[in-house]
Image (tube, rainbow, N blue to C red):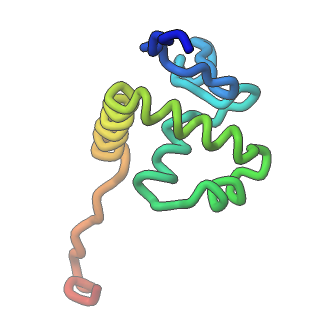
Protein backbone atom coordinates (compact mmCIF):
# COMPACT_ATOMS: atom_id res chain seq x y z
CA UNK A 1 0.00 0.00 0.00
CA UNK A 2 1.35 3.41 -0.95
CA UNK A 3 1.89 6.07 1.68
CA UNK A 4 -0.98 8.49 1.54
CA UNK A 5 -0.41 12.10 2.48
CA UNK A 6 -2.65 13.37 5.22
CA UNK A 7 -4.62 16.33 4.01
CA UNK A 8 -4.62 19.52 6.07
CA UNK A 9 -7.74 20.75 4.34
CA UNK A 10 -10.84 21.38 6.41
CA UNK A 11 -13.80 19.13 5.65
CA UNK A 12 -16.50 20.28 3.29
CA UNK A 13 -19.74 21.25 4.99
CA UNK A 14 -22.61 20.57 2.61
CA UNK A 15 -25.23 22.20 4.85
CA UNK A 16 -23.36 25.37 5.86
CA UNK A 17 -22.92 28.48 3.74
CA UNK A 18 -22.12 32.17 4.06
CA UNK A 19 -23.99 34.86 2.18
CA UNK A 20 -23.15 38.48 2.86
CA UNK A 21 -26.78 39.53 2.37
CA UNK A 22 -28.08 36.98 4.92
CA UNK A 23 -27.27 37.52 8.61
CA UNK A 24 -24.38 39.84 7.68
CA UNK A 25 -22.35 36.93 6.35
CA UNK A 26 -22.50 34.85 9.52
CA UNK A 27 -22.43 31.14 8.60
CA UNK A 28 -25.95 29.76 8.22
CA UNK A 29 -27.56 26.44 7.47
CA UNK A 30 -28.12 26.36 3.70
CA UNK A 31 -31.66 27.29 2.67
CA UNK A 32 -32.48 28.84 6.06
CA UNK A 33 -31.67 31.91 8.10
CA UNK A 34 -30.56 29.77 11.07
CA UNK A 35 -27.05 30.79 12.03
CA UNK A 36 -24.42 28.25 13.02
CA UNK A 37 -23.84 30.31 16.19
CA UNK A 38 -27.51 29.85 17.16
CA UNK A 39 -27.15 26.06 16.96
CA UNK A 40 -23.81 26.22 18.80
CA UNK A 41 -25.29 28.31 21.61
CA UNK A 42 -28.17 25.88 22.04
CA UNK A 43 -25.77 22.93 22.14
CA UNK A 44 -22.71 24.29 23.91
CA UNK A 45 -24.13 26.97 26.22
CA UNK A 46 -27.68 25.73 26.89
CA UNK A 47 -26.80 22.04 26.92
CA UNK A 48 -29.40 20.96 24.36
CA UNK A 49 -28.84 17.64 22.59
CA UNK A 50 -28.95 17.57 18.79
CA UNK A 51 -32.32 15.80 19.07
CA UNK A 52 -33.69 18.58 21.27
CA UNK A 53 -32.37 21.20 18.83
CA UNK A 54 -34.15 19.33 16.00
CA UNK A 55 -37.37 19.39 18.06
CA UNK A 56 -36.99 23.16 18.48
CA UNK A 57 -36.25 23.61 14.75
CA UNK A 58 -38.45 21.02 13.00
CA UNK A 59 -37.42 22.36 9.58
CA UNK A 60 -33.82 21.20 10.23
CA UNK A 61 -32.55 17.64 9.89
CA UNK A 62 -30.12 16.04 12.32
CA UNK A 63 -27.57 16.00 9.49
CA UNK A 64 -27.86 19.78 9.18
CA UNK A 65 -27.51 20.24 12.94
CA UNK A 66 -24.45 17.97 13.19
CA UNK A 67 -22.85 19.70 10.22
CA UNK A 68 -23.44 23.10 11.84
CA UNK A 69 -21.87 21.85 15.08
CA UNK A 70 -18.88 20.41 13.20
CA UNK A 71 -18.44 23.74 11.40
CA UNK A 72 -18.66 25.59 14.72
CA UNK A 73 -15.92 23.50 16.36
CA UNK A 74 -13.65 23.90 13.33
CA UNK A 75 -14.12 27.70 13.45
CA UNK A 76 -14.66 28.07 17.20
CA UNK A 77 -12.32 31.00 17.85
CA UNK A 78 -13.87 33.06 15.04
CA UNK A 79 -17.46 32.19 15.99
CA UNK A 80 -16.92 32.65 19.74
CA UNK A 81 -15.57 36.12 18.93
CA UNK A 82 -18.73 36.82 16.92
CA UNK A 83 -20.90 35.62 19.83
CA UNK A 84 -18.97 37.84 22.29
CA UNK A 85 -19.24 40.87 19.99
CA UNK A 86 -22.99 40.36 19.56
CA UNK A 87 -23.40 40.00 23.33
CA UNK A 88 -21.50 43.26 23.85
CA UNK A 89 -23.71 45.11 21.34
CA UNK A 90 -26.84 43.69 22.98
CA UNK A 91 -25.66 44.82 26.42
CA UNK A 92 -25.00 48.33 25.08
CA UNK A 93 -28.45 48.46 23.43
CA UNK A 94 -30.13 47.32 26.64
CA UNK A 95 -28.29 49.98 28.60
CA UNK A 96 -29.35 52.64 26.10
CA UNK A 97 -32.96 51.66 25.42
CA UNK A 98 -34.35 49.62 28.32
CA UNK A 99 -35.71 51.98 30.98
CA UNK A 100 -34.42 51.52 34.46
CA UNK A 101 -36.92 50.82 37.22
CA UNK A 102 -38.19 54.09 38.58
CA UNK A 103 -37.62 54.93 42.19
CA UNK A 104 -40.85 54.93 44.21
CA UNK A 105 -41.79 58.43 45.32
CA UNK A 106 -44.54 60.36 46.94
CA UNK A 107 -47.16 58.85 49.26
CA UNK A 108 -46.69 55.33 47.93
CA UNK A 109 -43.00 55.26 48.78
CA UNK A 110 -41.99 52.02 50.47
CA UNK A 111 -45.04 50.00 49.37
CA UNK A 112 -43.16 48.11 46.68
- Image vertical order of residue 12 relative to residue 49, above or below: above
Residue closest to the eye, 70 or 108: 70
Question: In the drawing, does residue 89 fall left or right of residue 62?
Answer: left
Looking at the image, which residue is at 66% across and 59% down? 51
Q: How many marks do you count on the picture?
A: 0
Question: In the drawing, does residue 55 fall left or right of residue 6?
Answer: right
Looking at the image, which residue is at 52% across and 36% down? 70
Q: Where is residue 40? Give x, y as percent.
A: 49, 44
Q: Where is residue 85? Give x, y as percent.
A: 32, 31
Looking at the image, which residue is at 61% across and 28% down? 28
Question: In the drawing, does residue 63 fall left or right of residue 73?
Answer: right
Indicate the quadrant containing the N terminus: top left, top right, bottom left or bottom right: top right
Residue closest to the eye, 34 or 4: 4
Looking at the image, which residue is at 59% across and 17% down? 18
- Image vertical order of residue 38 relative to residue 18, above or below: below
Residue closest to the eye, 88 or 73: 73
Q: Where is residue 37? Give x, y as percent.
A: 49, 37
Question: Residue 77 lies in what quarter of the image?
Answer: top left
- Image vertical order of residue 46 relative to residue 11, above or below: below
Residue found at the very far right of the displayed protein: 59
Indicate the quadrant containing the C terminus: top left, top right, bottom left or bottom right: bottom left
Residue found at the very far bottom of the displayed protein: 111
Residue closest to the eye, 41 or 110: 41
- Image vertical order of residue 72 relative to residue 91, above or below: above
Q: Where is residue 5? Give x, y as percent.
A: 46, 10
Question: In the drawing, does residue 32 fall left or right of residue 88?
Answer: right
Amino acid sequence: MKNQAISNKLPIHPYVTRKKEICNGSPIIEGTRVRVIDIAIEFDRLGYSPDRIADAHPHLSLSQIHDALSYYYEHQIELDTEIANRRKVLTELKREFVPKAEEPHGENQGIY
